[in-house]
Amino acid sequence: MKALVLLVAVLGMAAAQRQLIRPEASACQNRVKHATTFRNGHYYFFSWEHGPTRSHERDWLDARNICRKHCQDLVSLETQDESQFVYNAMSAKNIKYIWTSGRKCNFDGCDRPDLQPPIVNGWFWSGSSARIPPTNDTFSGAWNGDWSPSGGGGQRQPDNREFAETRTDEACIAVLNNFYNDGIKWHDVACHHVKPWVCEDSDELLRFARFNFPQQNIP
């Protein structure tokens, strides 16, 4: 299932004529490590903590490719602990919003019955290929994410509000820091918007780089 979701994601990017890049050996070896979590052992990169990117904002795919160059990917908030770790970093510097690797399957190959409707069942973490629980899932005790109860239109997220206004699909997940007086929450956002970003180590890309560039001794 995970491999299939990842394949669909890659096909979708190719259809848009903007490609995901492969890691670079020296970039992986020298990737900046701002923090790590004790649970998954991944290193994290915060764009606002690094001199060359401190004032930079990128669209979703550009930010993702910057991460991938360094054997990382945009952050996948798969647990409450990891989410709180990222929220704390945002709060410490009053960061207004960031990109995550969250993506809606809304491109060619996403017509599988289990992904319908996409706004409910089509969300996944492109950085890890893990599915995000349905947005209408209210199962007690499960981690269903931190979707905002309100957005710019006062509707529970995701609401695909921009599509109604400009016909642009809100297909990427950003974390907004009390932007609508709702706390630090997830929002669906059109992927062309520019934001700071958080990268985390990608096990898949690190395996690729360590196998293909063994002379680099990539940590």
Image (cartoon, rainbow, N blue to C red):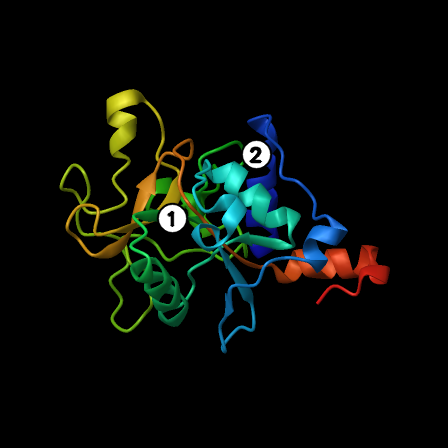
Picture residue at 70% right of the left edge, 67% below the top: 219
Which mark, by number, is residue 98?
1
Quick check: 53 above or below 41? above
Looking at the rendered structure, the secondary structure element under dot 2 is helix
Looking at the rendered structure, the secondary structure element under dot 1 is strand
Residue at which label 2 appears:
13
Picture residue at 24% right of the left edge, 33% below the top: 161
Find residue 201 and report its horizontal and vertical position in percent.
58, 61
Label 2, residues with CA under 10 Å away: few <14, some 14-19, many ≥20? some
Query: Looking at this rendering, what residue extends furthest in the top direction?
Result: 166
**Hey, what amino acid is under mark 1?**
Ile
**Hey, what amino acid is under mark 2?**
Met
In the picture, measured across the screen, residue 155 lies left or right of residue 171, that is left
Picture residue at 38% right of the left edge, 46% below the top: 173
- Asked which quadrant contains residue 145, the reply is bottom left
Q: Earlier in the sequence, mark 2 or mark 1?
A: 2
Which mark, by number, is residue 169?
none
Find residue 9 and report its horizontal and vertical position in percent.
55, 41
For the question of whether residue 100 can be seen, the reply is yes
